[in-house]
Amino acid sequence: MTEIERYYAPASLEQAVDCLQEAGGVTVLAGGTDLMPQKNAGRLKPQRTLMNIRGIAELRGVELSGGEIRIGALTTITDLLENPLVRQHLPQLIEACNHFASDQIRNVATLGGNICNASPAGDTLVPLLVLDARVDLVSRPEGRMLRRGLPVAEFFVGPGKTRKAPTELLAGVTIPLPPENYLGRFFKFGTRPALDIATISIGFGGILEGGVLSRVRVAFGAVAATPVRASHTEAALEGRPLTEATIAAAAAAARDEVTPIDDVRASAWYRKELIHNMTKRILDHVAHA
Amino acid sequence: MSVSEKPRFIAQESLIGTRVTKMDAPEKIEGKTRYIHDISLPGQLHAKILRSGRVHARILSIDTRAARALPGVHAVITAADVPDQRPIGVVRDHLPLKGDRVRSLRDEIAAVAADTEEIAAQALSLIEVEYEDLPLLANPEDSQKPGAPVLHDDHPDNVAMRFEYSHGDVRAGEAESDVVLEDTFKLHYVTHCCMGVSGIIVEFDASGSLLMYSNTQVPFLHKREFADYLGMDPSRVRIIQPPIGGGFGSKLDIYPFEVICVFLARAAKRPVKLLFTREEEFLASPTRQPVLLTLRSGCKKDGTLTFRQVHTLHDNGAYTSWGATTPFVMMQTFSSLYRVPHCDYHTVAVYTNNPYAGSFRGYGNLQATFAIEQHMDMMAEAIGMEPLEFRLKNAQDAGEVTGQGMSFKSCGFKECLTTAAARSDYSRKRRENLEQRQSGGPVKRGIGMASMLHVGGGAKIYPSDGCGTILKLDDFAHVTLITGASEIGQGSETVLSQLVCEELGLPMSAVTVVNNDTAITPWDVGVHASRTTFIAGNSAIGAAKKAKVKILAAAAKKLECAEADLDLRGGWVIRAASGEALLDLPRLLRSLHFSDKAELVMTTFYYEPPSVHQDKAFKGDVSAAYAWATQVVEVEVDTETGIVRMNRVTAAHDVGRVLNRLGIEGQIEGGVVMGQGYALTENLLVEMGVMKNPNFRDYKLVTAPEIPEMDISFIESMDGEGPQGAKGVGEAPAICVAAATANAIYNATGVRMFDLPFTPERVYRALAGKSEKLCWKPE
């Protein structure tokens, strides 16, 4: 019944991108937690070659160098939760991982997989947007390694669609190290504590000095075709004192700038209400932090 | 053995009320239990069913040629291949394989038996069906309008069943009322979500007899129905039940997949196994009955109830299963939970192109209780009385015979009310919560109560509500308890063994239960109506008492004393007065067996409860005992999201008597969580006949962190007819939760919700004043 003709498990990044370059028609398998259900439900047709990249050791892990945190694409959600660098510097990402599926799924699901699946509701994507992450894409045209970086905000083009070329592999993400006084928040609304797809999610990052916000980043999940940065909401906050009036204006801007849809999980109206109420709640918490 | 080695049994060590581990728990925890999934018969084929995927359509053609030609396929059947098929179901309105017309998304068109599941699935994909869509009937309210599509030609009014009940004169009751309320309530679709999906294995053996490995809850009714259906001698139909992964009422009816699998086995002349996928389990197993219900209630200023009038519209779905008959139970709650002098009850169950509703733990009582217990709070508020006081004033007592003819011989209702209220500090918290409605943060606290009445001593629906037991003691005093009562995970084999051990003075390890083979076990009507502990328990006790009489008679003869001076304990015949061990039981049994008289201790007993069939007006004492409960639910409502968190449930249940404390706690905890899912999270979304969320991602069962803290009290009313005083408890704990939650949300927010479920968006809408206004009256 299966159309897969070849299974390939490269041991290095070079081998993997070679395969993408040469074979054409490759399905990349990492954790498999999105791939397998999509295949079983008939939503994803496997290509002729199934390439399992789990054996590429260099794609897994977290390191800090040159003022940047680099996270390999094969780093699992459990790895992130247990990593001291992530715990110390990237609180939104930790919070998102804490709301990510179940322990069993976290043990195998990878950050790279969550990014490449490009769900508008993908749990880690909103924090990555807020953290100004860049995706690291690798290919090997004519035998030479080619790396290209792209802000994660530009990476997503629609549900399940990204700017990654078929010959490219996502090697990881790079995140500028947030400053010491950085405030990061993540909120996911689901109808239960975990094992749920976000109805909406909100990421916030910024610096609060003397009651004034700067370097503000706000992003929303599940309110548009991709996870999105909220430029109007950011503008309503940037450089302003975090007063009740500012918070009210930002929450209203948030409600006005999202474009959610009605689906089986929530109506567009309710999603807008949640964006408004929860943006306000997060900012209230930041103001009282 | 010398006299000095004999033990002495001074204190009576009763098993009743102790915590006994379920006999099947260790093997289930270790993953060793062999469910139907694990069973393979030699030569077995695998079956799959092609479903319509259309909601209402005429079938123009079915082309199975390519499927039949596929290597590995052994049988392909459509309606044309089984001209002998006849309708199944409660009113015989459901052909297993549809030949000319489909009426719902799940309708069976064709089926394949093949060497593997994969080949069967591939064969299905090769079957071509042409349809012509027909006008859709999705809304039960539309079913009675002129020009509505007619779903079954022999039901031109789209009505499957009607129920009319009354006692007293509601007009007189209304005339003497100071307060009259009328509201419409709307209850949604939920489904059982058994961990084990539906399945069956069918084999015709060498002699042509039919053997089915089945998960049914009613093996003896099934046996008869299949024999009748196939024109076979019932004695040539045998049903074996492997361990069943959950029932909750879902396995009370005969379903198309079972009949289809029999047809496939007949056609392929091989054993055939059919297992649902999880998605198929959602699409093609029955649901709880969705109901639109208008309740009119009245009372006097002093808090005396005056009348109740109920109209309900049941959405049957495309076919009629047990869901249509839930009014049997609903009307009991309206007529008899409280003393109400005048009561009318009317139901119309109508056809639509929606999923069809079956029986589900509580059997209509969750729906009825949701309405009645909200009205109790609302009437109390209208006359300025405390909800607890108002309920106590109208609650039933032992000795009462209701307008419907139910006779309450034991009744702990008032004690349930006062216990649950006291243990939850209900009245104080209710008052305090009222004060924080207008002040404080966005999260509001609420407390609400609801009570229920349910059958607790079986229900005489069939010609017999009985159960048979065969009991044998072997040469080593090991007991084999052969009972008609099925184990579906509820713990019946454990509690039945406990009752037998109590009579015979043996440890739990001395019993083996045989309960899953119609060729061996005596008749039982099935697992339903919270009846197994009560009915099968009394049956098991009856057989054990007969065995005890026989043993003590033999012992008395040997010891040359009176039988009354003797008793059984710890595997010994003892002197009742002193506890002194007199005869080793295995040795006594062997001496009976290997003697001139060559006697074995084997007994049988058939227990039929002293209940009666209701008459045509639905009056009569249908159960041998009745169960009562009050539950108090405490919630927090986040008014900025609509999330309702259930923090605590205080439950007080009149269970007659606790037999297995561990088992009954498990029943109540599980039932409360099922009620919590009904109230807060579970919602089978059906839009224009199409199920939108047939998966556990979007159909939300309650998960572990959401389960509330529970405080469970048992009111032991010691029922005179019950086994050791016990009453049934299986359905009771699920019944009150949604009603109590509605009252708690009102207490927290001042907003009353008349429709379920209380999912965040629906609660948020209600708080924003944007709910659908419900108002329904029959034409």
Image: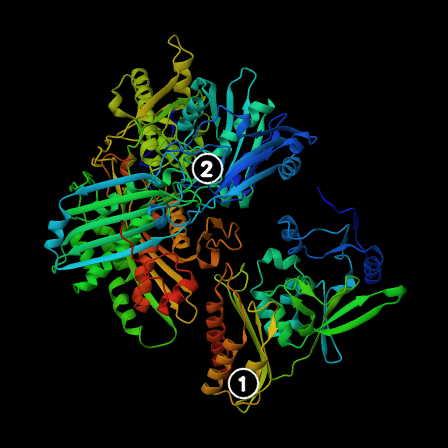
For the residues labelled 1 and 2, say whether their Cβ atoms are less than 8 Å apart: no
Indicate the amino acid at tag 2: Met
In the image, residue B279 sits, relative to residue B518, either above or below, namely below
B486 or B308: nearer the eye? B308
Residue B290 picture location, percent across and down? 37, 48
Q: Which residue was labeled with disc 2? A: B23
Indicate the amino acid at tag 1: Ala
SS for callout 2: loop
The chain to which mark 1 is attached is: A
B667 or A273: nearer the eye? A273
Q: Which residue was labeled with disc 1? A: A236
The chain to which mark 2 is attached is: B
Measuring 48% from the left and 64% from the top, which residue is drawn there? A267
Left or right: residue B768 versus residue B561 is: right
Asked if one can make out residue B470 in the rendered structure from this viewpoint, the answer is yes
Left or right: residue B398 versus residue B54 is: left
SS for callout 1: helix
Residue B256 picture location, percent across and down? 48, 33
Q: Mark 2 packing: few (<14 Cα in 10 Å), some, or many (20+)?
A: some
Distance from disc 1 to disc 2, alpha carbons, whole Å, reads 64 Å
Residue pushed farthest front? B147
